[in-house]
Amino acid sequence: MTTKPPTRAGNPFAAIDLPDGSDPVSKGIVRGFDRRDGTVTVEVAIDGLGDGLAERIVEQIRGAALALPETRRVRVLPARHEDKDVELPAVDHVIAVASAKGGVGKTTVSVALARTLSARGYDVGLFDADIYGPNVPHLLPEVEGPVLTNGHGQPVPLEGDEGLQVLSPGVVGGDPPTARRGAIAYGAVENLLGQGAWDQRDVLIVDMPAGSDDVVGAALEHVPVDGAVFVTTPFDASVDDTRRTIELFDERGVTPAAGVVNMSGFECECCGTQNTLFEGSVDLDVPVVHELPFDRSLQRNPGGRREYEAFDALTETVGAFVDEVLDDVPDDALDLRGLPLESQVRQLSDELGTVTAGTRVRAVVEDPTGVCDVLRRDVGDVLAAADRSQLGTTGAMIELRRG
């Protein structure tokens, strides 16, 4: 984006009236726009608005853009983190490990995932966001504080095995007070995370605290979280809480990478019999669910060399998510994920209408079948072919050709 609209003055989208009496600029929905060679591109943030309202606002923005002089084409695209207050210029992708339920093993999974990704050649950072009970240092005894600052006053991450970098409130000035709440608690996390002097990292794993408000809600609002791994035990109350966590992250536009059912069973140390701890299967609305056993060695040394195998499948999933879902959107493809289906179809219809016969239009969407079905219904006369290929775990590339 070359133009950002911080105020209403002179902004073509400030005259749009929203149902609550505000406008898309002051509301922060229009995050940026660009006018170039007859094309107006507008970035919008519509997470959590609901498809009906979001679609209506997108069409109003499209109409306002079309009304601008010399406009031949309009592109309305979902914003990608440009609005986040916490800037992490050295970090390519942020993956949260989360659950509203405490004691399910979030820290164990966070540490193991960070260590195993590092062992596979990724440059990884691990941030402990649990201001109330920072346990990462307990599972990484090789990471010893205190945290020092560089010449710019930035906290310098501690070094772990395999090049892993770690920051935790638990190694900054001793144990932090647990009475912090709300903005004060989140502020302590933001200062440490956002000001950290991270080296260039492919991925940053964030060990989230339990719950769904205070630090968690603020982090989702201010930190550019790209994806999440959700952790639960098979106990029904834990599963219910984790489902609510998934819904919260979905409302904030965070893509699920995987789910983990921790302590799903155990092997008897005496006879080797496999035992289940809870009855029934676990159903989570995520692309893939991995099961981890109850194993004392995993609790003592998650992600250690002898424990890699237990986390191999999860590491494969998250690695593929980072490589395929977050990195593999081609430069010539429109990333429409996050827009309502009808808005995706409208955008692709416009693109097809502005190209010559035989020309290809490429886009990434969540539901290629739904998009292609509606396109055939609406503009079947110009759509010659629609090919698709899976893109990681949360989307697909569709290639449309005009007849």
Image (cartoon, rainbow, N blue to C red):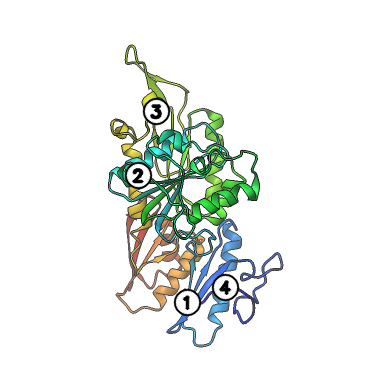
Q: Distance of mark 4 from mark 3, alpha carbons?
A: 54 Å
Residue in the picture at 60% in, 76% down: 13
Res. 2 mark:
1
Disc 2 designates what residue? Answer: 317
Which one is closest to the eye, mark 4 or mark 3?
3
Disc 3 marks which amino acid?
Arg
Res. 61 mark:
4
Q: Distance of mark 3 from mark 1, alpha carbons?
A: 50 Å
Q: Distance of mark 4 from mark 1, alpha carbons?
A: 18 Å
Q: Name the element at disc 2.
A: helix
Q: Distance of mark 2 from mark 1, alpha carbons?
A: 35 Å
Q: Confirm or deny contact between disc 4 and disc 2 (CB under 8 A).
A: no
Which one is closest to the eye, mark 4 or mark 2?
2
Q: Distance of mark 3 from mark 2, alpha carbons?
A: 24 Å
Q: Confirm or deny contact between disc 3 and disc 2 (CB under 8 A).
A: no
Disc 3 designates what residue? Answer: 300
Between 357 and 279, the residue placed more toward the observer is 279
Other residues around mark 3 within 10 Å, as few (<14) / some (14–19) / many (≥20):
few
- The picture places residue 148, in percent across and down from the top left corner, at 45, 49
Identify the mark nearer the N-term, 3 or 2: 3
Disc 4 marks which amino acid?
Ile
Which one is closest to the eye, mark 3 or mark 1?
3
Q: Name the element at disc 3.
A: helix
